[in-house]
Image (spheres, grey):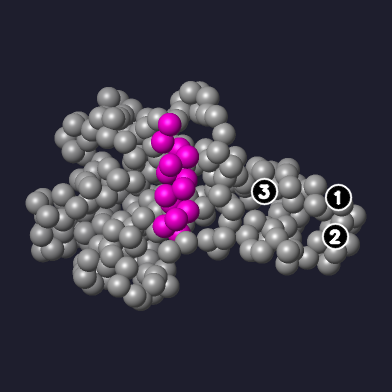
Amino acid sequence: MPSTIENPTPRPHPAAAFATTHWTVVMRAVRNSSPEARVALESLCQSYWYPLYAFVRREGYTSHDAQDLTQAFFEQFLEKNFLRDVHRERGKFRSFLLASLKHFLANEWDRKQAQKRGGQAKVFSLDAQTAEERYRLEPSDAMSADKIYERRWALTLLDHSLAKLQREYEAAGKGDEFEQMKIFLSGDRSQFPYAELAPKLGLSEGALKVAVHRLRKRYREILRAEIAGTVSSASEVDGEIRYLFGVVGT
């Protein structure tokens, strides 16, 4: 979605909201060698591979090399000997993941090693065509690799939140309603076409405004929970939200 989606309103956060976070997934994988723990960690990697790919590309690597390096990084990341020194107090998961990638690029592998490793079994498949299509849409200015990564991280969180919201509406049999109303999650409120859309949904203009209010409220809740999952304590959530929205807006 566009970067004009409104910033979630700060509010108190119960400790229970942190029962399951990205850090929780990592720490369970460190302690537990079960297939379930491995699958959960692989799913996390699958969700966040593109921001890392974009970082590697902006560092000057070709598309082919970036694919191999990103794949090789995640292969190493999923090894227990790589994760064994991970501590929750490392803070933000996005910072930990990027620092791990930088260490990997600088000290662990060179391009030829990554290419050789890339020819072996992969933990998951990177969609090369989609990756490059997305990368061509990145700003062509002098934005640093770190800023590209952070911007893509923030947009990935927005995408995940929107997808979850859509699934909720579809599960409630309101998929068509969601498709019609999702335009209200971004843009200038003064331009929202309430009068035009209300008849299409069989609602009065007032009822549509109530439905949109609920949509936006639920979206903010989902996005807060998504961001909460990437930090190690409730006290970091509001600062992370402000920072990521600032990154998206640059």
Residue drawn at x 87%, y 52% as measured from the top left:
206
> Magenta stretch?
235-248
Q: Disc 1 vs disc 2: Cβ atoms closer than 8 Å?
A: yes
Tell me residue 57's x, y (percent).
Answer: 27, 67
Q: Amino acid at mark 2?
A: Ala
Q: Residues within 10 Å of mark 1 (few under 14, many from 20)?
A: few
Measure the alpha-carbon separation of dots 1 and 2: 8 Å
Vertically, is 232 above or below 7? above
- Disc 2 marks which residue? 198
Residue drawn at x 27%, y 25% as measured from the top left:
31
Q: Which mark is residue 84?
A: none
Residue 211 visible in rendering: yes
Q: Amino acid at mark 1?
A: Ala
Nearer to the camera, 95 or 65: 95
| Image position of 36 (left or right of 83) | right
Q: Is residue 244 magenta?
A: yes
Measure the alpha-carbon separation of dots 1 and 3: 14 Å
Q: Amino acid at mark 3?
A: Arg
Nearer to the camera, 131 or 185: 185
Measure the alpha-carbon separation of dots 2 and 3: 17 Å
Vertically, is 14 above or below 112? above
Tell me residue 136's x, y (percent).
Answer: 39, 74
Vertically, is 49 above or below 31? below
Mark 3 or mark 1, which is nearer the start of the sequence? 1
Tell me residue 158's x, y (percent).
Answer: 51, 53
- Disc 1 marks which residue? 207
Q: Secondary structure at mark 1?
A: helix
- Disc 3 marks which residue? 216
Quadrant of the image for the C terminus? bottom left
Within the image, what quadrant is residue 200 found in?
A: bottom right
Q: Main secondary structure of the magenta part?
A: helix
